Amino acid sequence: RAGIANPNSNPQVTKALAAAGAHLPVTKAGNLSATKDVVEAVAPQDAATKQRPRTNPLQTLAADLLDYRHHDTLLSLFLRGFDVQARHGDGRVRPTIYTMGAAATGRMSASRPNVQQIPREGGMRECFLADPGELLVSADFSSVEVRVAAWVSGDLELAAMIRDGLDLHSLIAERVWGTAFTKGHRYAAKRAVFGWIYGAGMNRVALQLGAHGAKAQQVVDTMAQLCPGLVQWSAQLRRDVERGVRPYWQHGSGRITWLPSGESHKATNYVVQSTARELLVEALLRLESRIPGLPVVPVHDELVVFSPEPLAPYVADTLAECMRFSLPMPDGTFVPIESEPAAPAARWWSST
């Protein structure tokens, strides 16, 4: 399409985009750039519908290019590897789990295949099946990053919102876009919240929001109004890391997470992500003490358990219980950590 014989050729892609009217940035080497961010700015995806605009030839070309890159990534990262491992083995792939895989936060990682990377959408997870006589039981932590952020920061307002069942991202979306806000607006608010807390500058946050980028500053300002304790704590943490008075964060287990002295804007991310990791490990230990010996695969904030089919309902209930916590706050209240279990199934389905 549009004279691109090889969609993996940057010169061919940039030439076609420029001919269609795109204004492309130039790299330090003097070449036109067609990175994902650049092309997505031409045809930003609607967060609610997952569709990209195709109202003119340039947008159509950009959308087609992004579709191609998406499917090429699925083939190269997942499907070809699945095929090789299954074809030359016994029909199964068995990931290797590294329980301290991420050097910075201690979060788990995996390889051969990297189950952490397998997307929730697109059918990749349906490639994973339980053995005959077994079912897959899975559960996700619910909004764990916001809940952990409320706890580590001691933000009483945010903790109260969580206990009351309110959704921070929906509250922000309502204040910014009005009561008729959409799923896309909520998703934009969510991206802005985590982008800002985790150290992205305002320009980067606006770029992440795509079509909603003009509202980035308003979203961040609204977040500061709704959860001032978190915003102030995050800012203070950055200053402490920069000054060298907070070189690490120590968890209740005794494990230490070293904070990046040269990149203080990442400190909040390190603390929140590593604390979520502690909760997942504690949930694993609880499950092992209740039902020993079940094969378990940790995937980010999700636990996927292989259960004998007759026990699957009991395993699902037990897993959900093991993933619930009450984290104490300074005023004697608590932040609830909840889990969202999926119904036992023969295939690995997304639980959200």
Image (tube, rainbow, N blue to C red):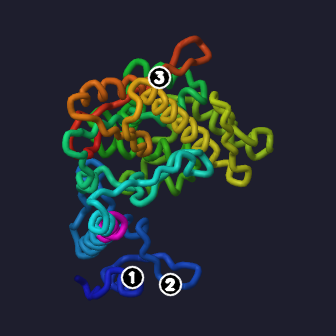
Residue type at mark 1 is Thr
- Judging by the rendered image, the residue that carries numbered circle 3 is 325
Residue 14: which numbered mark, if any?
Answer: 1
Q: Quadrant of residue 328?
A: top right
Q: Main secondary structure of the magenta part?
A: helix
Q: Is 259 in front, or is 315?
A: 315
Q: Which residue is mark 2?
A: 31
- Residue range in magenta is 72-81
Amino acid type of disc 2? Asn
Instruction: Specify the quadrant of the image occupied by residue 304.
Output: top left
Q: Are marks 1 and 2 in contact (CB under 8 Å)?
A: yes
Helix, strand or loop for disc 3: strand
Q: Residue at x 37, y 29 (%)?
A: 339
- For residue 159, above or below residue 135: above
Q: Residue at x 57, y 84 (%)?
A: 29
Q: Earlier in the sequence, mark 1 or mark 3?
A: 1
Spatial CA span between label 1 and label 3 = 51 Å
Can you tell which of label 2 and label 3 is closer to the viewer? 3
Percent x, y of residue 62:
30, 72
Q: Position of residue 7 (x, y in %)?
A: 32, 81
User: Which of the marked residues, 1 or 2, is nearer the chain's N terminus?
Assistant: 1
